[in-house]
Image (tube, grey):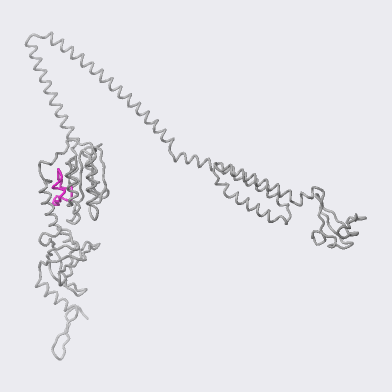
Amino acid sequence: MSARAELLSFGSGRSVYSVADLTAELRGLIEGNFPSVRVSGEISNAKMHRSGHWYFTLKDESAQISCVCFRGRARFLRVKPAGGLEVIARGRVSVYPQQGRYQLYVEALELQGRGALQVQFERLKARLGADGLFDADRKRRLPPIPSRIGIVTSPTGAVIADMLRVIESRFPGLHIRLYPVRVQGEGAAEEIAAGVRYFGTRDWADVVIVGRGGGSLEDLWAFNDERVARAIAAAAMPVVSAVGHETDVTIADFVADVRAATPSVAAERAVPEAAGIRQALEGTEARVAKATTFLFARLRNVVLRNGMDRAALTVGRRVGDAGQRLDDAELALRATQAARVRAARIRFERAERNLAALDLRIRLARQSERLRSLAARLVPAMRRALDDRGSRLAAVPATSGILRGRLAREAERLAGPAARLPRSVRAALDRRTSRFGSALGRLHALSPLAILERGYSILHSGSGEAVRDSGQVSLGEALSVRLHRGRLGVRVENRAPKGGIRAPSAVDSL
């Protein structure tokens, strides 16, 4: 259906509107009757979109209306939308066709009456004023040339960067100490008061700057806290308040010794310009030199007029001698200062080298390198020892497999941690190596090979089974005899039961 008016005639003569046409008709009626209205109510569900537009609801006890404030207007709002604020909104009423609802297009916001926060502000201001915290006679003058400046503000953002830049450009080399705090939200007032007390109870700062950037009344509310005001009043040194922009006023501004329009201006008020001081000193020096020259000239004329030329010559000679001695003293002083500077530089370089030698990172690196070197030598030695003992165990028959397996596992268990053993456990490793060698010796003593070395032999049947009983063989059966070195082939000539063994009459070699 077209957005243009499309009328369908029925028999009754009634017209049928499209949705768009009806919405347009209603929009024209509403905008024609409410081109500019002022609506009072409480703000809720306030939200700023990424586009910069504000969306919120204005409500009272029995009704509510949706509101929108576009970015171009929102930039100039004196009161930013926030939940719970009682405000008077000025704007026009119209219809939002896409959702078929009417809403208030806000152009300006102002606190209804004086606002809840404004009332709290005025009450606290009156109470502190009655206590004398705003009296002019308690205000202290800023030091002409401070050397140490304390700053209480947020460690992030443009405020601290701007103040440091201004201070450095006006008077380089000043000592600055920052007490980082939150400047808005829950707990901000307590942190700001603690920062002021920190500098106020320590004999360090010559002047303290307390501040933050601009914002709404809610954003600046931490500086309207009574704890902050009394901490500023109790500080032992002058305090400069630099909260928000020039139009923003807080309780801290009334209590502080000096109120600056912005943080950058506070830095300019607290720190003089070194170039200006230097120019003033040079001008004063020039005027003093000129006045001195003029005075000497007048005195010289007086002396000459009185016929005291000889005395003048004597005085001139003495003045010249004194000037020469002064020059000599200045040269000696400069030489002494240069020598002291060189000696101090030598001591500093020596201390720097000593500190570098004591650097734990260097010591740890050397220790790690030494441990790696020891491990590199220890692991191959352990492996060679284990390989040597393993080759000696390889000849042990299968009957000693269980013990050999246990020794092999023990060797593997010792070989793994060997690479990580520090010097402090080398003794333990030596003890385990000794125990391993002792066990290897006992195993060798129990080995059948050791028994064969003593002259015994092992008799095997044709199937390879060890012969332990004469009943296991038959007459004429070929057998194998294992000696300590080599083997023999024999044949059974006779046999006897247990207890009746006799020497065979013959043994035939195969």
Q: Is residue 298 above or below residue 489?
A: above
Q: Is residue 259 magenta?
A: yes
Q: Residue 432: where, in percent of width, then height?
A: 62, 46
* Quarter placement of the C terminus: bottom right
In-front residue for pair 264/402: 402
Give the mark count: 0
* Left-right relation of 414 to 218: right
- The residue closer to the viewer here, 61 or 216, is 61
Residue 140 falls within the magenta-colored stretch: no
Q: Residue at x 10, y 71 (%)?
A: 34
In the current view of this chain or complex, which residue is farthest to the right?
505
Q: Residue furthest left?
A: 305
Q: Is 44 located above or below residue 344 in the figure?
A: below
Left or right of residue 166: residue 87: left
Location of residue 150 in the rendering, given as x and y in whole percent from the top left corner: 23, 42
Residue reaching furthest to the front: 499
146 up-or-down from 190: above or below: above
Q: Which residues are magenta?
A: 242-261
Location of the N terminus by quadrant is bottom left
Examine the image and state in which quarter residue 346 appears: top left
Q: Position of residue 409 (x, y in %)?
A: 63, 53
Residue 86: image quadrant is bottom left
Q: Nearer the viewer, residue 404 or 317?
A: 404
Residue 250: image location, x then y, percent: 15, 51
The image quarter containing residue 496 is bottom right
Q: Residue at x 21, y 49 (%)?
A: 212
